[in-house]
Amino acid sequence: MSIALEDATDALRRKVLRGDYMPAAKLREVGVAEDLGVSRTIARLAMSMLEHEGLLSRAPNRGCRVNRFSIEQIVQAIEVRGNLEAMAARQAAERGLPEDVDSAFDDILQRSAQALAMGVQDEGQRQAWINLNTAFHDTLIKASGNWAIRVAVDQMSRLPLVSPAMIIFERKDFAKGNAQLASAHADHLEIVLALRARQSQRAEARVREHAFVSARNKRVNLADPETMALARALPGGALISDR
């Protein structure tokens, strides 16, 4: 991919996820080219990239439309991402953890425990938790040594609310929110223990269950109007339907 196309694709993706183009909005090459300040050829290729990612759908001779995502579609995508990560966990356990990867897991888990002890209440603490969660999932994929899993997970993570970074924090009930984060941290601990013991089936099952719980929580939480409002402020939130 050329630098010009990569930049145009990134810019178009940001505009779509930000809600600059509303769900079901029709996009035509000439309009996108003008918005991005690129040629129609680059605009067409960038639109094709987003079509491949699932953010746009193309209709013959009618340009593209911005896709709308139901809560169930988001749940399904999280489960698919979880299955990919479960495969990564199995392969990581089978090959064994390199020293640098093991040290990275240790650092993430220690910092997560410290964050929980202090409480995750303000925006700075929430962002720190997001960074730690993202680092854990990235390290898990790195541990597998499988580049294809990275490509597939990156693609799935571009969909609304599917990335490990897309955490919707409980703001009304601190104790409930802290309990959810503590449960996620406990899952991470169990996953790393299984990886270190080279228990491939156990590691795979724990990651799959971790993803299942995450998907279930998204389904339940997004049924609450206040939580849905918070979700709509996240990248891709404008593309979520109420059903």
Image (spheres, grey):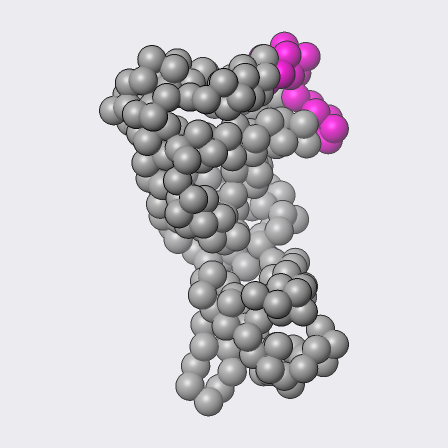
Secondary structure mostly seen in magenta is: helix
In this rendering, would 204 be left or right of 73? Answer: left
Is residue 45 visible in the rendered image? The answer is yes
Please name the residue shown 49% across and 48% down the image.
Answer: 154
Q: Locate residue 101, reporting x and y percent.
A: 50, 23
Q: Residue at x 43, y 81 (%)?
A: 59
Is residue 116 part of the magenta span, yes or no? yes
Of residues 63 and 100, the one nearer the viewer is 100
Q: What stretch is highlighted in magenta?
A: 111-126
- Occupied quadrant, residue 80: top left
The C terminus lies in quadrant: bottom left
Quadrant in the picture for the N terminus = bottom right
Is residue 208 part of the magenta span, yes or no? no
Residue positioned most to the bottom: 61
Residue 137 in the figure: left or right of residue 107: left
Does residue 229 show up? no
Quarter of the view holding residue 172: top right
User: Residue 58 location, x and y as percent?
Assistant: 45, 77
Q: Is residue 51 above or below residue 90?
A: below
